[in-house]
Amino acid sequence: ELKYPCHSPDKQRWFILRVMVFGDDSSKVVVSHTDISELMLSKDKLQESENNLKEIMDNSAEMIWSMDIDHRLIIFNAAFKEEYERFSGNTPTAGIIFYQTMPADAALLWQQKIEETLLGKNVSFEFTYNLENEKKHVGVFLYPLIRNKTVAGVTGFVMNITKRKAAEQAL
């Protein structure tokens, strides 16, 4: 099997070449030549769309991530990655359960909030933690990730509200 481009002056085209033995005689083969241009163009469009979404996420100051029903990270943006590395000393990767690096009481709170979201509820709460000798306050917004009318995971948005909290306390 071989995929290859075969562009014309006015159209991009791709084909797949397959060679199969015909019957019991290995000296005889069947060759098929199939146009897969539509598939390849669709893949290119999907990749471009994914890249655009990633750029939007990475240009956001808010931490954005999603996880599956087993609480494993699927995708996250640059702000999440940076804060996670500062908080835990580790680089986040798809498949980890990020709150397991937190102290037990904080991990339990996150686990409970995520479980509530997995029941189909939008959940928001404020969370405070210390990072590099500085108290940080964040607003957390969790939303069920729905696929085919079923909760398939959680999407999270985390906003730094430390300055707002300081202004509130100053009043």
Image (spheres, grey):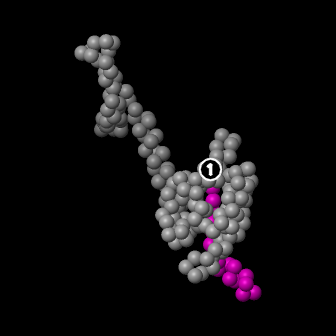
> Which residue position holds label 1?
70
Residue drawn at (52%, 72%) of the image: 86
Q: Please give the name of the residue rendered at 31% of the width and 18% of the height, measured from the top-left corner.
A: 21
Quarter of the rendering containing residue 128: bottom right
Q: Please identify the quarter of the rendering in which residue 17 is found.
A: top left
In this view, the residue farthest toward the top is 24
Residue furthest to the bottom:
170
Residue 156 forms part of the magenta stretch: yes
Residue ID at (75%, 87%): 171
Tell me: 70 left or right of 51.
Answer: right
Foreground residue among 30 and 94: 94
- Give the residue at x 65% y 66%: 104
In the image, the segment drawn in magenta is: 155-171
Q: Position of residue 29 (x, y in %)?
A: 29, 17
Helix, strand or loop at label 1? It is loop
- The vertical placement of 94 against 39, above or below, is below
